[in-house]
Structures are given as structure tokens and as C-alpha cells.
Image (tube, helix red, strand yellow):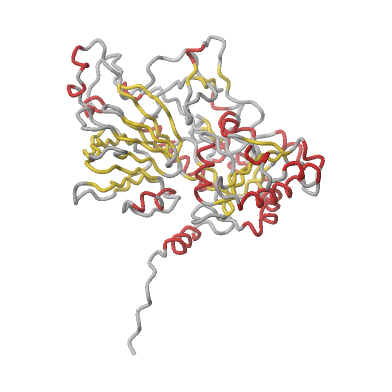
Amino acid sequence: MAKDLGRSISGVTGESHGAISDSEMQQNQLEVVFYPDSSHRRKSSLVTMEKPRFRPHFDQHDKSTACYVHSLIAGEWAVPSGQVDEAQDVIRTLGDEEATVDTKSSDQGDVVSVIDTDNKMLKPVPAIVESRHLTKRQLSDMAWNVRKLSKKLGSIKLKLTVQNVFIVSKTHDESLVSLTRKMTRWLLSKDRDAPYNVYVERRLETHPDFGALQLVQEEPSAKSRLLYWDPKLAQEQPHLFDFVITLGGDGTVLYTSWLFQRIVPPVLSFSLGSLGFMTKFDFADHQKILENAFREGVVVSLRLRFECTIMRSKARLKDPNSRTLTSRDLVEELIGEEGEDTLTHTPDRVYEILNDVVLDRGPNPTMSQIELFGDDEHFTTLLADGICIATPTGSTAYNLAAGGSLSHPENPVILVTAICAHTLSFRPIILPDTIVLRMGVPYDARTSSWASFDGRERVELHPGDYVTVSASRYPFANVLPQGRRGEDWVHSISKTLNWNSRTKQKSFK
């Protein structure tokens, strides 16, 4: 339950914080951690099927790992009654120590694959210990602390110690290969302040326009510093990368969020695509922009992401009535009373999304029937082509096309919009990010439904299955241009969508 804002972040610049030597900066890290113990059991369908055999270990009050979020919020979770000087806490750093897991007592049954994007098991990770969802109080506290952290980050500049740079370019745009080469060549030059290790997509290793061999010939020291990444490397070793640069449009930023499902290094995005809601930097000035970012620091905004868990209906083998799905009631199973040790559902996959999760009819010719829940309340039964649950960042995507509201990305909300609802009264609604939403296919539905996550993964939900949506513990660290935090978004929708654009009304003469 940790969100590392990049292993490179080693201090905060500012007059009141003092200076930090380069050697200290290279030895230290900062980590954002949200980990109130979530042992509360709300409903059997929200917890793992078996009790774990081991637990992650955290030192009491996180004294040995001065986590970044605790530093910025003055330890308000760990020691609520303590009075800690905030200016000193801001520059507290985290060494190489990390939360450890006792694996001596574990076996192959103790690991699960959290993300399985290509039907191939990626890196095995320890089984989830607690419920996928926090208690209502814990979720509210976590969301509040994320908002407070993001607000504080907007008023300070983070000084980075960058060694490993991760470059993501728009996949299907061949014109960007030469620009990727240009940036890579500049980063690998011996004229830089530090010998950066540059990671580019593996497909570029043999691409003729990229010319990897020529780059090495021009700069011999680049032979060991020009490296290549693939999705598996980003999934398994996100701590390896200190800084991410994207070349493309908003789709490239979404792909970056998809690559880093949990830990997200700071992401600086150059505008080389069609839209530009999240790409704020001009590539023509990329050298100056990167020099300032590495030398002087960056301003980071934490964009809300959603954690989505697919829950599969579990057959009741001991119940003779379980052979017929129509005898089971999804509403009763999710918000009704449960018997002791009764598991109605088991978790299947978990996704961290930046834009939206959509539940739709897929290839089925008929409408989808979807049950919508908020916390322990059944909201409504929806008959429509589908439903879109969007983050504030995703409010300008599918949510907008479906008639949903626009929302500033700093709003702590969840946007719910029906897609072609078979009623005149289903209006889009905006909910706080402290609510846990669940969207399920009732047992008596005529057809299955399909869930998609940031438009990249399509998963069929059979009758009885559902998806949970809640605020993620791993927000997206987005680098912002200095001095343009608030007005940038309004400028983006005005420029891109021609928001409220009309001919000016003539005055009376």
C-alpha cells in the first residue's frame, strides 16, 4: 500500500529547507505511503478467499522509513497528537530501506498475479493481505490526505536526483522516432550534468530511423547507458526509473499510466499529439525545459486514479439451489446480511486507471442490465448500452461524449454517466471520491456485459460478476509548468473543445 513518487526525489528546494549535498541526494529516497491497517471485514465478497500466511511488516509509526506523505502532513496519521515542525518534516528522506515481507513461511500458493494484461503471468507478488477496500473512515482519511498532499506539492518545488530516464513515445507515429532519437542523443551527451541512463522502447533498438548503433558511435560512453524497456520491465521494476518523459498526446500519457500500474515516477509530457489536456510542454524547448527540471526541480500534481477490482461470482457447491443462477440475488449478496464464512465472490484482477472504467453491452445486440451500488447502498438498476465511471482527468474523454459533466482535474470526485440509457431521467451524477462504487451484472440478466479499463483491457462479466471502483492509493504524478497550475485546464478546454465559443453579441447603438 505504498506510492513512491519516484526513487529520485530526494529533497525539496526552498529557502527555509536548507541545502542538501549531491552525495546525500544520491543516497536518499522519498516514499509516499498510505497504509492504515485495513483489517475491517465489511462483506465477504470484498475480501480475499483465504487468510494470508504472512503480512507486510511496517515499523511502528514508520520511524525507520520517514515516508514522504507523513513528512508533508506532519505525521497526522502516525502520531495524531504529536506536534512536528513541518519545515523539517518536508525534507525528511527515505533511505534504501523498504517494507519487507517474510517469505520464509510462504510457498507457491502465497503468490498471485495482480496484473495480467496479455494473458501471461507477470511478476508474482505477495497475496493481498487485506480487503481490496479500506473501511469507510480509512478511505475518507486516505482521500483527504492525498488531496492535502497534492495541495502542498503544488506550492513547493521538488529537487530531483535523476539517473535513469524512461522515454515513452507515441507507438504508431513514425514521425516521432526521429524526435525520440534527438532527445536521447541530447540526454546521452557528455555535456550533461550527470551521466544519465536512458531507457527507450525495445522496438527502437533495430529501428533504422532511431539509429542506435550510430548513437553509440557518436558517444562511446552511451554503450552502457542506452538501454531498452518493455512493459514487463516497467511492471516489475518501477523503482528503477527516476523520471518519465512522454512524446505524444494524451493517449501516450494514458499508456504511461497503464505501464506503471502502481508506483508512478514523475511524468513530464511534451505535446506532440492531437489534444493536449495532459501534455503541457512544448518540444521545441525540450532542452531548456529538461535542464531546468533536473537542476532547479519540478512542480508535481497528483492526479486521482481509480483502483478497479473484478470480482467473480463463486458457486455455492454446498447449496443445491446454486445450480440455478436465477435463484441468487446480487443485491442481497452485496449489501444484505451474510452468513459466517460465506464467500459470495472472489477477486480476479486489479487495475489502476487514470481516465475511466466503462461497463457496456459489448457485442451483444440487447441492452445491458447493470446494478449500481455506492458503499452499502443499492443506487439503481440501469438499462442502457453501458455506464462510464470517470476520474476528473477522464471527464473530457468518454464521459464528455456520453453527456457527462466536465470537471477540473483537482476535484476529488467520481463522475457517473449512463451511456444511451433507456430512460429520460438518468442524469449524470458527481460523487465524492470517498465512496466505493460497485457495478454488477445481475444473475437474471439476459446477457453478459463487458468492462474496459482506460480503453485498453476488455473483460467479460458474466451474470453475478461485478467491478469495484474506489480512489486509488497510487495517484499519477504529473509534472506541471511553473506558474500555470490553475488556468491551464480552462485554456485547454477552450482551445481543444471550443468551450463556450460563439459570436459576440452586438451592443446597442
The one nearer the camera, 15 or 476, is 476
Q: Residue at the spot x=69%, y=53% of the render?
A: 292
Could you tell me if residue 464 is visible in this image? Answer: yes
The one nearer the camera, 327 or 201, is 201
The one nearer the camera, 139 or 344, is 344
The one nearer the camera, 191 or 340, is 191
Q: Residue 236: where, in percent of width, then height? A: 58, 28
Task: Assign the C terminus to one quadrant of the image.
Answer: bottom left
Q: Residue at the spot x=70%, y=46% of the render?
A: 184
Say above or below: 275 vs 303.
Answer: below
Q: Residue 117: where, in percent of width, then height? A: 47, 31
Say above or below: 47 vs 93.
Answer: above
Q: From the viewer's perspective, tell me whether residue 186 is left or right of residue 301.
A: right
Q: In which quarter of the image is residue 505?
A: bottom left
Q: From the viewer's perspective, tell me whether residue 427 is left or right of residue 205.
A: left
Q: Residue at the spot x=57%, y=24% of the render?
A: 99
Q: Residue 445: where, in percent of width, then height? A: 21, 32
Count how many numbered circles sit on residues in the image. 0
Could you tell me if residue 10 is visible in this image? Answer: no
Q: From the viewer's perspective, tell me whether residue 377 is left or right of residue 474.
A: left
